[in-house]
Image: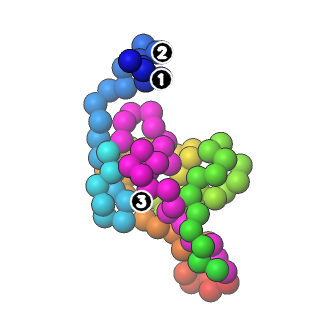
Amino acid sequence: MARTPAELAGANSGAPFEITMDGRPVPALPGQSVAAALWSAGILAWRTTRTTGRPRGAFCGIGQCYDCLATINGEPNRRACLVPARPGDAITTQEGHGHARIGV
C-alpha cells in the first residue's frame, strides 16, 4: 500500500477548510498554497492571457513565471503558488493583467 508524502514525513496537516474558486467550494488543508488547493480540486487554469485570452495556471510553482496570477479576495495579480490558502479565501479567475480600468 502506497503512503502519502504527509504520512512519510509524519506530518499532521490539521483540519481541512474551504476556499472558493469563482464561487465554487474548494477544500484546502493548512499549509497548502492557493495553487496547490486548486490543483487538488482538479482546477488547472485560473487566469487568461491579456491579448489572446488563453488559459493559464501554475507552471513553475515557485513564483518565478507569473503564470499563476489570480485575484484573491479582490486583489489581482497574486501569485497563487506562493499565497497560503486561508479559510474563506475567495479566488476569482483573473482576465489578463487584472486591472480592467487600464484597458491595455
Give the x, y percent position of residue 95: 54, 74
> Circles 1 and 2: CB distance less than 8 Å?
yes
> Judging from the image, what secondary structure is the residue with disc 3 in?
strand
Q: Is disc 2 surrounded by few (<14), some (14 to 19) or many (20+) residues within 10 Å?
A: few
Instruction: Identify which residue is drawn at 67% across, 47% down.
Output: 60
Three-letter code for the amino acid on which mark 3 is drawn: Ile
12 lies above or below 21: above
Q: Is disc 3 surrounded by few (<14), some (14 to 19) or many (20+) residues within 10 Å?
A: many
Residue 94 belongs to the span the image colors magenta:
no
Give the x, y percent position of residue 8: 46, 15
Residue named by callout 3 = 91
Three-letter code for the amino acid on which mark 2 is drawn: Ala
Query: What separation in Å lies between label 3 and label 2 (alpha carbons)?
Result: 30 Å
Residue named by callout 1 = 5
> Judging from the image, what secondary structure is the residue with disc 1 in?
helix
Question: Considering the image in quadrants, where does the N terminus appear?
Answer: top left
Give the x, y percent position of residue 3: 42, 19
Query: What separation in Å lies between label 3 and label 1 (alpha carbons)?
Result: 26 Å
Residue named by callout 2 = 9
88 lies above or below 9: below
* Quadrant of the rendered image containing residue 29: top left
Question: Considering the image in quadrants, where does the C terminus appear?
Answer: bottom right
Three-letter code for the amino acid on which mark 1 is drawn: Pro
Instruction: Identify which residue is drawn at 33% across, 56% down.
Output: 20
Which residue is situated farthest in the bottom direction here? 103
Closer to the camera in the image, 86 or 53: 53
Between discs 3 and 2, the one toward the N terminus: 2
Give the label, 3 or 1, closer to the camera: 1
Residue 42 belongs to the span the image colors magenta:
yes
Q: How is the image coloured?
A: rainbow
Which stretch is magenta? 28-51
Q: Does the rendering let one see residue 37?
A: no
